[in-house]
Amino acid sequence: MNLFKRFHNDIVAVVEGLVAEHLLPPGLDTGRITAEPPRDPAHGDISTNAALVLAKGARMKPRELAEMLAGRLGKHGGVISAEVAGAGFINLRLDDGFWRDRLIDVLDSGTAYGDSDIGKDAGKVNVEFVSANPTGPLHIGHGRGAVFGDVLASLLEKAGFDVTREYYINDAGKGGQIEALARSVYHRYREALGEDPGEMAEGLYPGDYLIPVGRALAETDGDKWLSKPEAKWTDRFANFSVDKMMAFVRDDLEAVGISFDVFTYERNLHQKGKVEKAVDWLEEKDLIFKGTLPPPKGRIPEDYEEGREQLLFRATDFGDDVDRPLTRGADFPVKERSKHKNQNEMWTYFAADIAYHRDKFDRGFATMIDVWGADHGGYVKRMKAAVAAITEGKGELDVKICQLVNLSEGGKPVRMSKRAGDFVTLREVVDRVGKDVVRFIMLTRRNDAPLDFDLEKVTEQSRDNPVFYVQYAHARAHSIFRHAHREFPGIDISPHNLAKGPLERLTRDDEIALIKLLTTWPRQVESAAETHEPHRIAFFLLELAAAFHGLWNKGNDDASLRFLVPGDEALTAARLALVRGVALVIASGLGVLGVEPVEELR
RNA sequence: GCGCCCGUAGCUCAGUCGGAUAGAGCACAGGAUUCCUAAUCCUGGGGUCGGAGGUUCGAAUCCUCUCGGGCGCGCCA
């Protein structure tokens, strides 16, 4: 349990004790009481608003109540003072010995420090991310969603949640992208067999990455499809291509250190009748109807035509702005049987998405997190409405939108033209700057803010480069360990041994302050996990690295402040314990980010 | 025109599910440093938190309105 939660519980216990003694009236709402580190360290170590929050219910003035609570809290172990300040805050100050004991906690826990159990009873969590269409390689924008989702999943795991990483594949688009993919590959297939199919048609995928796919098909199947009509080969080409593309995608993700537990294919949902069943269920609950969509809100487009009648989901019952179509017209006969639609209609993607989220819920995921690209922002409301409907309010969907990545090189923007098939792939970036850099940089901004990614800057060894700065802190700690062995041959710098050392030699304010910073780590993990905001981990690491570098630099001005103190092995051991604590917490944080905590920089 | 996201120092951004005098880096100004364990360090100026109301003991944070930017916008994928 994190430190602040422990004090929170103590404070609540004090309040309850006072109630039991009839010094406070019963029925007070303790739910809003907080125990947090104050922003200003001059205000002590732990600050609580208890008196402010309870004053009204207790019919007391906040400061009077605060005095009463402070009297009790001041007697707690480790507390050296409990002062009333401001409107009625209570500031607790803890003695140095208390903090040194917390350093022992860090050393004993190792990189497991920060692990939490807040997710233990929360049920299974599904994090669905990337889910890029299997029609081309992943680009840098996918990379952001990929890293975000993967780190969010790791973060939730560290906080004790049972997490599944899932990828959804839209492979069912008859008359859509999958057909275009099959045709594109057929084009490459003909080329591979020596034919000249000419220019690739409009709307197909001209990228070079399909050339090996066409060639592979030529090798395995020979020329047997050359003379056949499209209806004969389209399924074969679609399936083969999707499999190949997904193999590429998995490979690229592997290069960034990401793997998935589950891949769900849209086509399977259709084939197993799950879309039909989900719509059946909605019908039973009277949540669908045949109707025409109203014209779009606001200005009506010039080419607006009165809508056809189609099957609609009552999304407006669940907070959406408009009811959403489940079927759309098809310009080819649809073979699939359904009582909800005729042969001129097919399911919309939304209908499949409803079935998909229903499927996740049925698999035991009450908490679902979807990580989407910025261009899907307009889809959030309807999906949340659908989840509310289909889980009858028992499931929860959080959609995290990742904004664009602005790729640049030496300050000059790298332009990407998707149409020509020439865009910077995730793989190219990873091969160039390394997976650790990609992973860290992706989390140096909130997910909902655009991210600048400069291929040159991110590999610089300077203060400006956050990846370097954090990794350097860890490497620097280990450099100190190496020098320690030289200075004090035979010194045992294992965490276990350092924890038993003379920590009372840590007396300086800046040393104690660094320990305090370490103790906020478990709280950072919990709040980042609860808010689904993995970027907080990266920011915490930067703060910790800065504090550590700062302490190191003091040794420049004053040699007695260095971690290694010649002639004083006891003081050195105590300071090494602190250095070890920092290294462990950084390693713990980098572990969540999936970044290697290197011990040496080249 | 409608919806979503964003608006915080000159720039890029944090801001702990409402807390005290709003922070960091860069840039700028001044100073220290060639020492060492490994890639400098310290100090300082700089803000109507886009604006206006409201809720509250207390608002960058919540609500309403408004201005500005990005994204999306019927049967598309």
Image (cartoon, helix red, strand yellow):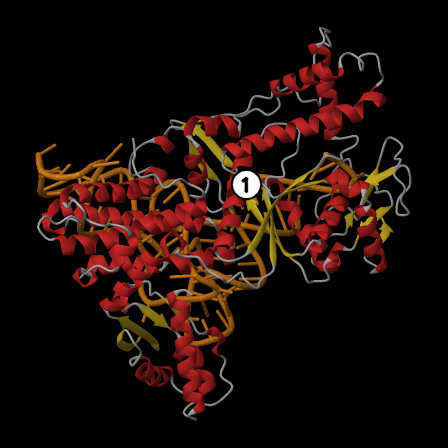
Q: Quadrant of the C terminus of chain A?
A: top left
Residue B73 place in picture, x, y as percent: 69, 41
Q: Is A321 situated left or right of A602 in this image?
A: right
Residue, far bottom: A22
Q: Count of labels shown?
A: 1
Check disc 1 and report its element: helix, strand or loop: helix
Residue A148 place in picture, x, y as percent: 51, 44
Q: Chain of mark 1?
A: A
Residue under circle 1?
A145
Q: Is A21 situated left or right of A152 in this image?
A: left
Residue A213 place in picture, x, y as percent: 66, 20
Q: Is A555 situated left or right of A280 in this image?
A: left
The structure residue drawn at horizontal position 59% and vertical position 39%, both measured from the top left corner, is: A130
Quarter of the image holding residue A317?
bottom right
Query: Is residue A271 in view?
Result: yes
Residue A557 place in picture, x, y as percent: 11, 46
Query: Is residue A201 in view?
Result: no
Label 1 crowd bin: few (<14), some (14–19), many (20+), radius 10 Å: many
The structure residue drawn at horizontal position 36% and vertical position 59%, both measured from the top left corner, is: A520
Q: Is A54 situated left or right of B28 in this image?
A: right
